[in-house]
Amino acid sequence: QVQLVESGGGLVQAGGSLRLSCAPSGRIFSSAYMGWFRQAPGKEREFVASIRWSGSMTYYADSVKGRFTISTDNAKNTVYLQMNSLKPEDTAVYYCASAPAPITRASAVTSSKGSWGQGTQVTVSS
């Protein structure tokens, strides 16, 4: 399995921005998908955004469309989540994921034997 290491979380005021990074170890095939999910206390892990490693296809949750952007830098072997206009309800632990198929549900990562990162905390204060 691929190991994923996230970074870039932190505390930010509402309306601010953060950029999360995820660096997979080992080779990622261009057909693989990378995604970001988040989990707030007492809630289920929810989909945020995903992208084909080649960068050709992207998917977003309705709650983040127009505010978040997912991208890949194949030269740096890194996937990013640029988060703008952050809201207090964006507060959660954010997880990077990889899978061999499109991922828009947390269960799809597990069922396809994908990988999860350890998570990074994002806190948005009002």
Image (tube, grey):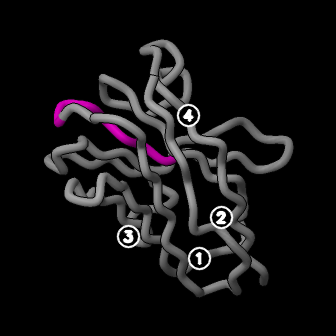
Mark whose residue sits in front, 4 or 3: 4
Q: Amino acid at mark 2?
A: Asp
Which label's residue is closer to the chain start, 1 or 4?
Answer: 1
Q: Quadrant of residue 86?
A: bottom right
Per the model, the C-alpha gap separating discs 1 and 3 is 11 Å
Is 32 part of what is drawn in magenta?
Answer: yes
Nearest the camera: 26 or 4?
26
Which residue in the structure is indicated by mark 1? 86
Which label's residue is closer to the chain start, 4 or 3?
Answer: 3
Q: Amino acid at mark 1?
A: Leu
Which label's residue is closer to the chain start, 2 or 4?
Answer: 2
| Circle 2/circle 4 CB separation < 8 Å | no
Q: Amino acid at mark 4?
A: Trp
Per the model, the C-alpha gap separating discs 1 and 4 is 24 Å
Which residue in the structure is indicated by mark 2? 90
User: Position of 54 compared to 42: left or right?
Assistant: left
> Which range is magenta?
30-36
Which residue in the structure is indicated by mark 3? 66
Category of crowding for the residue at label 2, using alpha-carbon neighbours closer than 10 angstroms: few (below 14), some (14–19), many (at least 20): many
Category of crowding for the residue at label 3, using alpha-carbon neighbours closer than 10 angstroms: few (below 14), some (14–19), many (at least 20): few
Category of crowding for the residue at label 4, using alpha-carbon neighbours closer than 10 angstroms: few (below 14), some (14–19), many (at least 20): many
